[in-house]
Image: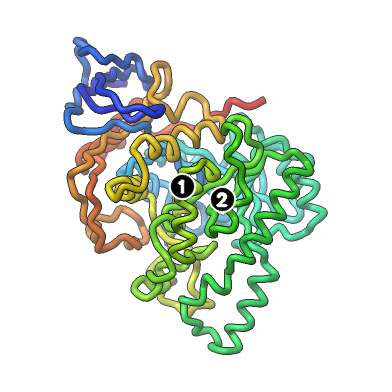
Amino acid sequence: MKTILIKQACLVNEGKLHHADVLIKNGFIEQISATPINQKADIELNGEGLHLFPGAIDDQVHFREPGLTQKGEIYTEAKAAVAGGITSFMEMPNTVPNTLTQELLEAKYRIASQRSLANYSFYMGTSNDNFEELMKTDPRKVCGIKIFMGASTGNMLVDDPMVLEKIFSQCNQLIATHCEHEPTIRRNTEVYKQKFGDDIPVSFHPVIRSEEACYLSSSFAIDLAKRNNTRLHILHISTARETELFRNDIPLKDKRITAEACIHHLWFSDEDYKTKGMLLKWNPAVKTAADRDAILKAVLDNKIDVIATDHAPHTLEEKANLYTKAPSGGPLVQHSMQAVIELHHRGKISLERIAEKMSHAVADCFQIEKRGYLREGYYADLVLVNLNKPTAVNRNSLLYKCGWSPFEGTTFSSSIEHTIVSGHLVYSNGHFNEDKKGERLSFNRN
């Protein structure tokens, strides 16, 4: 592998900003020095005026392969991710077929090893009837178990209380949950279908997939986890009320119950349905500005531990359907880091907190081996950012296979200049070097 020397960048790492040179050899950070490193390297990057972050680790994406590749592929979506400063991702099991066996799980790893420009891990999926397969999952090689406690694709809604109790009591690794109370959502949907038929205005989406539906399911999952001492991670918190379910009086390393906030819940509010329409239809729904502000406060207060995307592309044709037919989700990985940096420019979050919530805390939460920090001896997953070089989001600049973004028309104040994945300079000023693929994540777990 080529050696890389980054000169005089401002490192954003472990709560501090400081200038240093960084030398990368054989995929790892060899040296970090406040004094100049006078050593020849195959590639030298001028970091003056740039900020060097640990690569973002996205703990929730849907890259759609296999079976849904009209929307996205591991190759296309990982390419967009590295252009956005995401160096590692964890992908969800609601592909087709659903990832409900060890054989199907390993098939996704094989695809990624050949095609993903970012580092990768894949969740094992759960259903009401795959417990034996679930328990074969190796916690050192797989990021976690995913349970949909709200609607999902195919056979992945787990709504049998006995099955949930069994999984929560016997599973020996991290369980990540999508929490929405399905009976509440069904009742709400019927009310609005009686009024509007299938053409329900999308502005009612956060009423149908309501605060109550989210809170009932999240609080139920937490009660289950507390009763069984389960390692639980609740995804995409979307309401202010839910933030009160989580603790900030103990360090992350001691938490058994953690939570995630997503970019769309930190950026948009229900006012944006007027202009974005079905493009803003996500599950859980984007809710009020007060909810949005409370989620950011919970991130800053350490009640919510990590920031991710829930990147979930659909085609524009699918999104153009009536409410009951239009799928939920949207693409975000190409601009997630810039969106959070934009919140920094607005005075809402520090650069140090961005590195913590998008890198350090994700690595700690999932016990990822030697990633998520700028440390000597760690894998070289790095992102050089120009905080003051604007990036306009337009359709021609998008790398997603679906070809659209909810951020179209936005100009971010920052730009991603270079992305290094496992010691390989994969993205540099708009150009890709695809000679080396990303690596499978490993986890420091018993």
Q: Position of residue 361 (x, y in %)?
A: 49, 35
Q: Which residue is farthest top? A: 38
Q: Position of residue 24 (x, y in %)?
A: 31, 19
Residue at image location 22% in from the left, 16% down from the top: 41
Q: Is residue 103 visible?
A: no
Residue 109: x and y in percent read 52, 39
- Residue at (42%, 61%) from the top-left corner? 330
Secondary structure of the residue carrying tag 1 is strand
Q: Are marks 2 and 1 in contact (CB under 8 Å)?
A: yes
For badge 2, the amino acid type reads: Leu
Callout count? 2
Q: Secondary structure at mark 2?
A: loop
The residue singled out by tag 1 in the image is 308
Estimate the spatial distance between the alpha carbons at disc 2 and disc 1, rounded to whole Å.
9 Å
Could you classify mark 2 by the number of other residues whose Cα lies within 10 Å: few (under 14), some (14-19), or many (20 or more)?
many
For residue 199, above or below residue 277: below
